[in-house]
Image: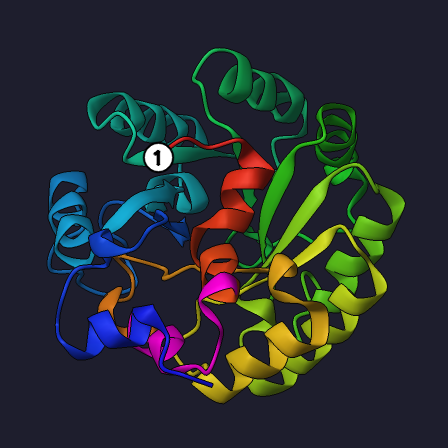
Amino acid sequence: MSESIVRALVSRGETLAALPWPVIDAHAHLGPTGAFAIPSPDAASMVRMMDRLGFAMTGISPHLAINSDYRRGNDLAAETVRRFPGRFYGYVTVNPHYADDVLPELSRGFDELGLVAIKLHPTFNDYTLHDDRCLPIWRFAEERGATLLIHTWEGDKRCSPTVAGEVAAAYPRAQFLLGHSGGTRAGREEATRVAKMHPNTHLELCSSNLTAAEIEAMVAAVGPERVVFGTDAPWVDPRFPLGKIAAASLTDEALRLVMGGNIAALLDLAP
């Protein structure tokens, strides 16, 4: 296989803006987190990095939303999308522990704030995807044909890829992004098995321990149409995951789909 255009540009230290298609980061956050210090967690800094790398658009769920205050975090996501038109899209986050607010907040996120997908973090918020309090989330997503980005992790009974796949099987009109694809090598193998069984599940790539060889294997197993590029920025420096996908032996057409085409089609995005 000849060298991909992505690898050639990255190897020369050039921006991906030269690509004939837009790059979209489907999994990112915004703002500081209590876990550790992030040098540049603000939206303006993220846009400068996006411009440096040649990313057209990034999907965000603020750390505030997935940690302590989902309503304020959702407001921040919407404000950021408005402040930088065409550069960000936003996920609406809910916490099933506040069961009475789940459906109203999903509706507010989609219908008032202009957020376009759902983000769930069962590990941070300590609930299982099988909790009955999650039922309004699945029903909302099924009714609207919505996409959900769900944090998945191997060995976590709250949100392993297998558990996410069981939910996906019950709600075939919703689309499920398996965030981190299980997070570990074993988790990625599990997530790949799940994606092969359930056509409305998609493998998402952000992980600090992912290898280029694993990316190649995931694309080979489920097809490039079912794999989505994400970086976890600013939690992770986006140059790190970009280097991994650039090193993978994938065709330019596969890279077009994985690095933007798939998420753009799922969410009807226009970077």
Is residue 182 one of those drawn in magenta? Answer: no
Q: Is residue 65 above or below residue 247?
A: above
Please name the predominant secondary structure of the magenta segment in the image: helix
Residue at 65%, 71% in the rendered image: 156
How far across and down, in percent of the image, does residue 260 sit?
A: 44, 50
Which residue lies most toward the front here? Answer: 2
Q: Nearer the viewer, residue 202 or 125?
A: 202
Residue type, label 1: Pro
Residue at 74%, 38% in the rendered image: 174
Quarter of the image holding residue 33?
A: bottom left
Is residue 154 at all visible to an observer of this figure?
A: no
Q: Which residues make up the magenta segment?
A: 242-253
Quarter of the image holding residue 134?
A: top right
Is residue 31 at all visible to an observer of this figure?
A: yes
Helix, strand or loop at disc 1?
loop
Q: Is residue 64 above or below residue 198?
A: above
* Horizontal arrangement in the rendering, residue 3 relative to residue 8 (left or right): right
State which quarter of the image contains the C terminus: top left
How far across and down, in percent of the image, does residue 240 sit?
A: 27, 74
Residue at 69%, 44% in the rendered image: 175
* Horizontal arrangement in the rendering, residue 75 relative to residue 203 (left or right): left
Q: Is residue 92 above or below residue 246?
A: above
* Horizontal arrangement in the rendering, residue 230 relative to residue 119 (left or right): left
Residue at 32%, 42% in the rendered image: 57
Residue that label 1 marks: 271
Categorize mark 1 by other alpha carbons within 10 Å: few (<14), some (14-19), many (20+).
some
Q: How many marks?
A: 1
